[in-house]
Image: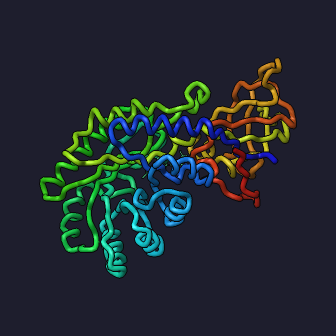
Amino acid sequence: MTPYYNYDISLLRRTLDACLNEAYRYGYQVHYALKANVEPVILHEISSRGFGADCVSGWEVQAAVENGFAPAKVVFAGVGKSDDEINYALEQDIFAFNCESLQELEVINELARLKDKVATIALRINPDVNPDTHRYIATGQKESKFGISYTEVNEALDKLQALSNLRVAGIHFHIGSQILDMSSFAELAHRAGEISDWFFERGVAIEHLNMGGGLGVDYLEPEKNPIPDFAAYFKVFDDNLRLRPSQKVHFELGRSLVAQCCELRTKVLITKRTGGGANFIIVDAGMTELIRPALYQAHHKIVNLSAEGECRPAERYYIGGPICESSDIFARDIEFPHTERGDILAIKSVGAYGSTMASNYNMRPLAKAVF
Ligand code: LLP
C-alpha cells in the first residue's frame, strides 16, 4: 500500500475557511493555483467554496471546469500556451488570459477573431521585485522568463490599439513562491499601484489587479503552524495597494491552501551504514513522489509513526528513497528515533507540489491518495 499521500480534509477545510474569511474582509477574489494539487476530491472542496481557479495549461483549465470551478472565475497564465489550449479556453469563456509576451497578444487576438470572440486579458508584468526564496521559484526579477518587462509596456499598448479581439481588463504579477517575508509583498503592492496609474494616464482603465500567489508555509513546524497567516498576508495588500474606485484585487494562491493538509506515508525498506559511516534509512517513497528536496534542497519534516508512544533512543540518520539518483535524499544527518525495517514514516507538508510533480521514473506507478 505504501507509499501513499494521506490527506487531512478537516485541516484543508479549516485552511480554506481561514483564507476566505480574511479575503472577504477586503472584497478580494482568490483563485486556487491548480499546479499545487489536482486531486479531484481537493478540487471539489475548493471549488464548492467559491474560489476561482488559476491554470497554467489547457488541461488545468479543463480540470478546473470539470471539477466545479465557474469558467467566469478561471484565469489562464503561462509563458507558452499552444493554439489548442488557447482555443479550448476561448470556448469556455474564461475570466481572463494572463498574457506574458507581445507575440502572445497577437496569437490570442487571431484565434479569438477566428471564433468571432473578444478575449479578456490581463498583462503579466514583471515588476522586478526580488523575494527572499529559492532561485528556482523566484519569478519576478528582470532576468526571469515570465511576463512582459515594464520597458515593453508602451509597445504593448501601441500593439493593443490594433488588436480588436482583445479587451485589456487587468494587470497581473507573480513574484515567486514560498515567501514568508511580507515586505516583498508590500513592495509588490506599491509597484502594482504605480503601474496601474501609469495605464490610467494612458487611457487604459485597469479593472482588476492580480497579485499572483506566493504566500509560504511553515515546513519546519507544520504541527505548530498548520494554517498560514492569511490575515497578515491580505493586510499587507490592504495597507500598501492604492486602488481606484471599482478596481478589484485578485490572488492566485496554491501552496498556502493545500501544502499542510497532506503527508506522504512510506515504509522503511532497508537500514544500512555506508563506507563513509553515514547511517542510512531507505524508504519506499522517493523523488518520484516528492521531488522538492532533490530539486530545491527543500526541507520537509519527517516523523517515524511506528516510534510514536515508544521510548526509542535518538540516532543520526540520512533518509533516502530507492531511486537510482544520488539526489534522491529526503534528509541529511538528522536526529531521528532509532528506526527499523518495516517502520512507517510520514513526510509532512506534501499537499502542494508533491503529487503534481510526481513521475514514473524507474517505471514506478504513481502513488495513491487516501482521504
Ligand atoms: N501564480 C503564478 C503565475 C505562479 O507561477 C504560481 C506558482 C502561483 C500563482 C502559485 O504560487 P504559490 O501560491 O503556490 O506560491 N514547484 C515549486 C513551486 C513552483 C511555483 C510555480 N508558480 C515548489 O515545489 O516549491
Please, which residue is most extreme toward the right here? Answer: 341
- Look at the image and tell me whether residue 9 can be seen: yes
- Look at the image and tell me whether residue 277 can be seen: no
Residue drawn at x 44%, y 52% is 52
- Please tell me which residue lies in front, 315 or 225: 225
Q: Quadrant of residue 241?
A: top left
- Please tell me which residue lies in front, 147 or 199: 199
Residue 354 picture location, percent across and down: 62, 47
Question: In this picture, is 114 found above or below 224?
Answer: below
Residue drawn at x 23%, y 48% is 246
Residue 237 picture location, percent across and down: 32, 37
Residue 358 left/right relative to 296:
right
Q: Quadrant of residue 312?
A: top right
Residue 247 left/right relative to 34:
left
Residue 18 left/right relative to 117:
right
Residue drawn at x 77%, y 48% is 322
Residue 294 left/right relative to 153:
right
Residue 272 picture location, percent across and down: 84, 36
Q: Quadrant of residue 168?
A: bottom left
Residue 40 picture location, percent across and down: 61, 55
